[in-house]
Amino acid sequence: MHSLKIKTLLASIALAAAGAASAQNQLLNASYDVAREFYKDYNAAFIAHYKKTKGVDVKVDQSHGGSSSQARAVNDGLAADVVTFNTTTDVDFLAANGVVAKDWNKKFPNDASPTTSTMLFLVRNGNPKNIKDWSDLIRPDVKVVVVNPKTGGNGRYAYLAAWGSVREKGGTDAEAADFVQKLYKNVPVLGKGGRDATSIFLQRNIGDVLITFESEVVSVDREFGQGKVDAVYPSVSIVAENPVAVVERTVAKKGTAQLAHDYLQYLYSDEAQEIAAKHAIRPRSEAVLKKHADQFKPIKQFTVAKYFGSLTEAQKVHFNDGGQFDKLYTPGK
């Protein structure tokens, strides 16, 4: 009986050790809505790369939603090892709460943003409303679909791009506010995240134009079939950085710090940058970007810093409760 107890105890210890080892080789990436397809391909490439170079089998799971919703979920206990968002404010929120490192943006190159995107318009096939630039979005005959800037980075970038488009033409902040207010009066319904906004536009058939990330063009063609939408590049748009960070709180518990770091570092490899380009996400690598110059049309872009100081400042002024967005937008009016 005694030897049976010892065997049972040893088996339990072995099982626990195996479980701990497997947990150390398993990652959860909390990411934003429209990055689903990119990370599906990237994860497969990373798993193969890690097996080849380290001889280790790893597993990567994904969690997707509006960038801000994901940040709140991670803050509230979602055990993600890494976050890959589309606005720095969502990572800063986690840094302020001690979930990721305070200096997270110094941990990887390019301020820990391995890729970028920009905002453009998706219109229905043939562009029946002849939408060409931001000014067309406030016409009385145009209905606009966009993400709620309070729930998704996609929506914040759309709002800031619209505001900045007025400033780029020499307009004042007062004129920009007036323009943005008119634009949101043309919004019949706000999406919760990028993919939700796409569903509103294409599945529910609401609106004449969808403001979204450049990368969503490829996703729409793959999911809904070629020829459903046309991409319209406005005269000017915003640089949208895609920041990444290790979730220190989780990796400390799970022992996945090195794997999490390696996973994010590999996003800067040529292979990963090529995968990003395939999904219409702009690579940071100049060589890869140049190689795909026909795909990434030149567009005049301005940074968030130019008109808003930083995304953190923009969050306080525009998107926090009682901010500019709340003053400019009244649902159903």
Image: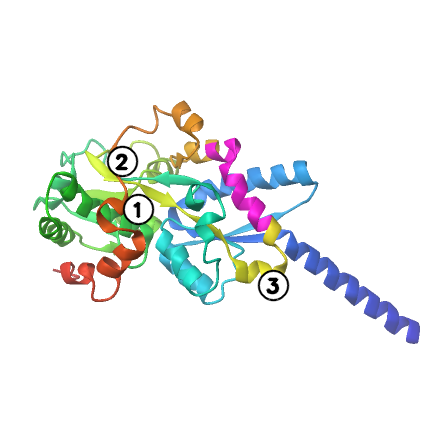
* SS at mark 3 in the image: helix
Residue type, label 3: Lys
Q: Is residue 113 magenta?
A: no
Q: Residues within 10 Å of mark 1 (few under 14, many from 20)?
A: many
* SS at mark 2 in the image: strand
Determine which residue is flagged by label 3: 253
Which quarter of the figure is the C terminus placed in?
A: bottom left
Give the mark nearest the N terminus, 1 or 2. Answer: 1
Question: Which residue occupies 49% across, 45% down?
Answer: 108
Magenta region: 259-273
* Image vertical order of residue 234 relative to residue 179, above or below: above
Q: Are marks 1 and 2 in contact (CB under 8 Å)?
A: no
**Mark identifier at residue 198:** 1
Q: Residues within 10 Å of mark 3 (few under 14, many from 20)?
A: few
Residue type, label 1: Thr
Give the mark nearest the N terminus, 3 or 1. Answer: 1
Determine which residue is flagged by label 2: 229
* Disc 3 from disc 1: Cα separation: 37 Å
Front position among marks 2 and 3? 3
* Disc 2 from disc 3: Cα separation: 46 Å
| Horizontal side, residue 161 vs residue 70: left or right | left
Q: Nearer the viewer, residue 260 or 35?
A: 260
Give the mark nearest the N terminus, 2 or 3. Answer: 2
Which quarter of the figure is the N terminus placed in?
A: bottom right
